[in-house]
Amino acid sequence: MSIPQEEPTGLSPDVALTHLVRNVDGVTDVFTPSIEVAHLPGLVTALVTGDADALNRVRVRSTPESTDIATRIAIDVDASTPATAREVASALLASAPPGAEVTISVEVSRIS
């Protein structure tokens, strides 16, 4: 079972999305959907400082026409995998700008 965590203040919008996903009941961890060159400076900083909470694990790509939001999650073995993935997708969709064309991708990487 996941323990809800308070969202730290002063986070970038993308890192705040990581905390949003972590707070969904049944989510035990959040992973970056893919390693991209743009994420390397943040990854290095988080590793050097030991501040894993500063690492964004939700990818947001926006164009004038649409926004794509993607993440990978681990789910508690006692939680419903489909329901937890839907809850994560709903939370991410609710964070998107109103009226935006949004695609949400949630990949389940592990059940633990």
Image (cartoon, helix red, strand yellow):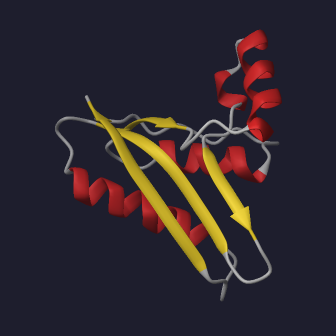
- Quadrant the C terminus occupies: top left
* Position above or below: 36 against 43: below
64 relative to 34 in the view: left or right:
right
Q: How many marks?
A: 0
The image quadrant that residue 61 belongs to is: bottom right
Q: Looking at the image, which is closer to me, 22 or 70?
A: 70
Q: Residue at x 77, y 29 (%)?
A: 40
* Position above or below: 74 against 101: above
Q: Residue at x 55, y 55 (%)?
A: 70
109 relative to 43 in the view: left or right:
left
The image quadrant that residue 92 belongs to is: bottom right
45 relative to 105 in the view: left or right:
right
Q: Looking at the image, which is closer to me, 1 or 17?
A: 17
Q: Position of residue 8 (x, y in %)?
A: 70, 38
- Quadrant the N terminus occupies: top left
* Position above or below: 5 against 59: above
The image quadrant that residue 87 belongs to is: bottom left
Q: Position of residue 19 (x, y in %)?
A: 59, 43
Q: Residue at x 25, y 59 (%)?
A: 83
Q: Residue at x 54, y 44 (%)?
A: 33
Residue placed furthest toward the bottom: 99
